[in-house]
Amino acid sequence: MKVTKRTFDAVIVGAGGAGLRAALQLAESGLKTAVITKVFPTRSHTVAAQGGVAASLGNSEEDHWHWHMYDTVKGSDWLGDQDSIEFMCRKANEVVIELEHYGMPFDRTDAGKIYQRPFGGHMSNFGEKPVRRSCAAADRTGHAMLHALYQRNVRANTQFFVEWMALDLIRDAEGEVLGVTALEMETGEIVAFQSKATIFATGGAGRIYYSSTNAFINTGDGLGMAARAGIPLEDMEFWQFHPTGVAGAGVLITEGVRGEGGILRNSAGERFMERYAPNAKDLASRDVVSRAMTTEINEGRGCGPHKDFVLLDITHLDPKVIMQRLPGIREISIQFAGADPIKEPIPVVPTAHYQMGGIPTNYHGQVVAPRGNSMSVAVPGFYAAGECACASVHGANRLGTNSLLDLLVFGKSAGETAVEDVKKSTKAHKALPQEAIDRTLARLARLDTQKDGADAHQTRLTLQRTMQNHCGVFRFADKLKEGVTKILEVQQDVQRVAIKDKSKVFNTARIEAIELENLIEVAVSTMISAEARKESRGAHVRDDAPDTAEHPNGRDDDNWLKHSLWFKEGNRLDYKSVKLTPLTVDTIELKKRAY
Amino acid sequence: MDEDRGARLRRLRWHCRRALLELDLMFLRYWQRVGDDVDAATEAALERLLEMEDHDLWELVSGRQETGDPQLKGVLDSLRQA
Ligand SMILES: Cc1cc2nc3c(=O)[nH]c(=O)nc-3n(C[C@H](O)[C@H](O)[C@H](O)COP(=O)(O)OP(=O)(O)OC[C@H]3O[C@@H](n4cnc5c(N)ncnc54)[C@H](O)[C@@H]3O)c2cc1C
């Protein structure tokens, strides 16, 4: 079947921070630029970010990009690529100051400079003592960032396709990416977007977990589209869990609550963190607290009828402190846990928060995949940035505030590379291969004609529960093995999901079924990569890879200092080496990660 | 239900996909409770709420901010009840 074709120099999928930063680069250079987004740009998940964006501006005290780089490599548990990390930390000041010029209302010092706050993991002088590196706009950093970028894009004549759902990558037999197919929700029409540069900035996929801090839009569509087009997904076993999501809802309770004196308790009322981290106690790092909570639950000391959460207690705090210093926490707890935290503790569980892995890229923002003898060859016409991409700067664990930085730096760099590539090319647009378009149409037709199919809602729940129970904070060999079998069964169900509503206009059932087809790719890649990695590193912690003298924290550099690459075809895994050589400075040598 | 109205309601539901999980969850519960039982006035009020920025909307939905607008108030009350 023929579909309508629209032609651009560049097409960006996603209008969060990464997509808008990339689009700006293209539109301002005069290229005909389209941004496709399934929700209005300023409803993108970037709006949820509150903590801030890291840059070693040194406005409050001395700081240096090299120290920031050290913290990031250490945070990544040495799995981050040191060339990309150097690139990002060196570029941080430039991209943050640029945003300031675009009108972003950063908090300011009395002297009128950008005010900087302390944040976990930010240290001066190579891990010596905390430094103030986070730049914020009150508690609306992500929101302010997105607005500044959106306004600037409007001015630059970026063309927005709002409430359009990208469906598949269009890739020809030579492997070149030529655009995407997309569905206009308002009409149900399928359109082929033809472009010389296609940039994915579709955000994370936190919704693969039952308990997630991510909004419902984070379904990993870009990862699904890339995987179906034969692009591998990198380091998918690494997911950051936030220790305190409201049980049953996922809504994040900020670290500030423990900072103000909040205490975690088990079913016996015990302050269990005293056993796991005698010094830092409830203020230990995210992964230590998450694992301690999980151990309490697994050993039967959880609370509630199913013993599946612990309690965050602030009843001993002065209600005035709660209202003044922890605004919003009371409302969240009342709404989502039915508990007024002034009178009773908040039920919490470790909750999936951030995806470290993604579509493999280099620091130019080009998507890279194995070809011939090389593991990282640029895929012509294809770029990615933000949470959907893996540059890889976060390695096995992300430092807070580094993801807003990631999307600015690599959004810009993907944009710059695309501008260069498009301007260099003298050829006309290549013809779109009909087979690629037909594959999308066949996928949609299957959905419409499926008889006695699986229920989308039920299948998604099973997917999320399987990930939560088999591939959570703390991982067990037998559970992972079983998890692989189960998630492949869920995959079978996804392939036979049916929808009752066949209407054209705003068919949300269809959209959700399409999202499910993306979620499953992310879930399968996560489970398979996690089962295969037999060490513990960063956020991937296995019970059978404990802390020993030979392998501190269970990390096994001899065998596992390498990136995982999962391929959809045959669920094959391959590995590529970590780039330990930075651009200009010396390698930050392997060490035990300890805080 | 006529086709246009069905489409309008589906569109409204899609506009309930927000940047903040807090709002996603509130709207999910709301729709589970009301189903298609939304009159024209409620529809109009919902549309206005959904035009707002997420953080401002959450302030209203969570009750941290009040509105003097009786029509919005009705919808906000039933959102909180859900
Ligand atoms: C509660 C919370 C707080 C956080 N706080 C911080 C913080 O303080 N500092 C920090 O550095 N990081 C923080 N993070 C992480 C950070 O916010 C995200 O990693 C980052 O915003 C992701 O931005 P993005 O541009 O990659 O994607 P997003 O902002 O998620 O945007 C994705 C875009 O892709 C579009 N899209 C997706 N699929 C499709 C499709 N199929 N078709 C069309 N469009 C599509 C969406 O419409 C959207 O526009 C936080 C995360 C959470 C959950």
Image (spheres, coloured by chain):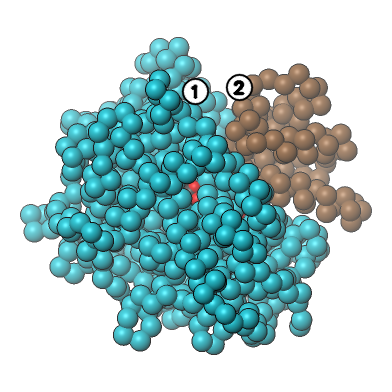
Q: Which residue is mark 2?
A: B64
Q: Where does the image place residue A330, in percent across and percent down from the top left?
A: 51, 24
**Residue matched to label 1:** A327
- Secondary-structure class at tag 2: loop
Question: Camera-side residue: A405 or B45?
Answer: A405
Query: Are circles 1 and 2 on residues that touch, CB within 8 Å?
Result: yes
Q: Looking at the image, which residue sits at the far right?
A: B2
The label number, if any, that marks residue A335 in the structure image: none
**Chain label for disc 2:** B
Residue pictured at 77% horizontal, 68% vertical? A189
Locate residue A372: give its quadrant.
Answer: bottom left
Left or right side of A516 for A345: left
Which amino acid type is marked by label 1? Answer: Pro
> x and y percent of residue A477 in the render?
28, 63
> What amino acid is at disc 2?
Arg
The tint of chain A in the picture is: cyan
Does the beta carbon of the residue at mark 2 sit less than 8 Å from ligand 1?
A: no
Q: Is A227 situated left or right of A360 in this image?
A: right
Left or right of A133, for residue A431? right
**Does dot 1 land on a helix, a strand or a loop?**
loop
Residue A314 seen by the camera: yes
For residue A172, above or below residue A38? below
Colour chain B appears in: brown
Chain letter for mark 1: A
Please name whichever residue, A153 or A316, is drawn nearer the observer in this view of the structure. A153
For label 1, being within 8 Å of ligand 1 is answered: no
Q: Are marks 1 and 2 on the same chain?
A: no
Q: Residue at x 76, y 30 (%)?
A: B75
Q: Give me the C-alpha separation between circle 1 and circle 2.
A: 9 Å
In the image, residue A294 lies at what x, y percent?
Answer: 33, 44
